[in-house]
Every structure is written in C-alpha cells, then in structure tokens.
Amino acid sequence: MAAEQNTPEEDPPKTSKMSLILGLVLALIGGGGGFYATWSGMILDGSEKSDHADATHKDVEDPFADIAFVEIEPLTISVDAQPQDRLLRFRAQLEVPKNHAEDVTKLLPRVVDVLNSYLRALELTDLEDQTALTRLRAQMLRRVQVVTGQDRVNDFLIMEFVLT
C-alpha cells in the first residue's frame, strides 16, 4: 500500500485546441461569405428584390389615397316599444372607394331606409349581448352592400351606438 502511494500520477495527455479554433474561424468565414453572397445578389437575384421593394414602397407611401368616407345621418330608433321606452342613438360612416363616393351618396336615402328597418326589427336582448356590435356591424354592412351594389362599400364604421 505504501508503494502505491509513492508512485507519481501520470498526467492525462493534453488535447490540442487548434481544431476547435480552426472550426470556429472557418464557420465565421463561411457565414460572412454566405451573407455577402446573398447581400450582393450572387445567390438571390437582387434586382427582383429591389423592384419588389420599390413597388411596395410606392404602395406604402399613400395607402389611403383611394378611400373616401360617406357619413350617414344620425338615427334615433325606439327599441322594444314597451312602457319603458328605450332609444338607440346610432351614427355611422361608410368607407368607399373615391370613384364610388358620389354614387353611394346618391343612394343614402335607401341606405338609411335599410338601416332603419333593420335596427327597428331588433329586440333589446339582441343589443345587450357582448358580441352584438360586431354581429350587427356585419349584418348592416351586408345590407348596405346589397343596396349600393358590388364593390362600392368597403367597410361600415359605427361612430356612435348608445342605448338609453
């Protein structure tokens, strides 16, 4: 046992870190070369990319150039004709393409008639539901689009919806 304690321990062989450093340097060179090849257009054609970017930039410059808003006159509608009269104050606007704004403005009496008829047919329980405004908005947009014609009204914006 004493002989075993006196023997010097052998040092483990040292591994070279040169392969790790070489791999890291080659990875950096490869990543940099790939970036440069892509950025300069050697791999992906840069001219198509820049043409698309220019077209997108032109669209982004003024995305609201072709939009007009047509205001619908405010409506006050009685809901559930019972002893306690409840009134709905309603105001909205229509988002239309500029070239159809005049046509939609001419049809506003029909639009008001359709909205008035639809809102008068609703019951109080229809208006008090949490999802009522979203559902009513979709229904009114569809009715307005039927009255005005295809592709003349893009959206129906509710500006005021107060039940008193």
Image: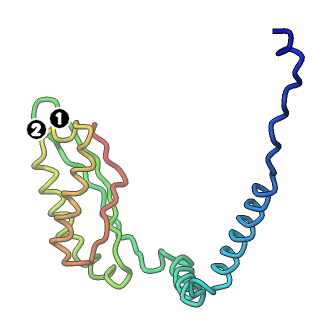
Name the amino acid, label 2. Ala
Marks 2 and 1 close (CB-CB < 8 Å) = yes
**Dot 1 crowding, Cα within 10 Å, few <14, some 14–19, many 20+:** few
**Quadrant where the N terminus is found in the figure:** top right
Report which residue position mark 1 lands on: 85
x and y percent of residue 12 in the render? 80, 36
Q: Nearer the viewer, residue 106 or 145?
A: 145
What separation in Å lies between label 2 and label 1 (alpha carbons)? 6 Å
- Residue plotted at (35% across, 50% down): 160
Q: Is residue 123 left or right of residue 9?
A: left
In the rendered view, tell whether residue 163 sits above or below residue 30: above
Q: Is residue 54 above or below residue 1?
A: below
Which label sits on residue 81? 2
> Amino acid under label 1?
Asp
Q: Residue at x 81, y 56 (%)?
A: 18
Tell me the residue at 19%/78% (across/down). 149
User: Which label sits on residue 16?
Assistant: none
> In this orientation, which residue lies closer to the viewer: 61 or 95?
61
The image position of residue 97, as x and y in percent, is 36, 78
Graded by Cα atoms within 10 Å as few (under 14), some (14 to 19) or many (20 or more), the crowding at tag 2 reads: few
| Placement of the C terminus among the 4 image quadrants | top left
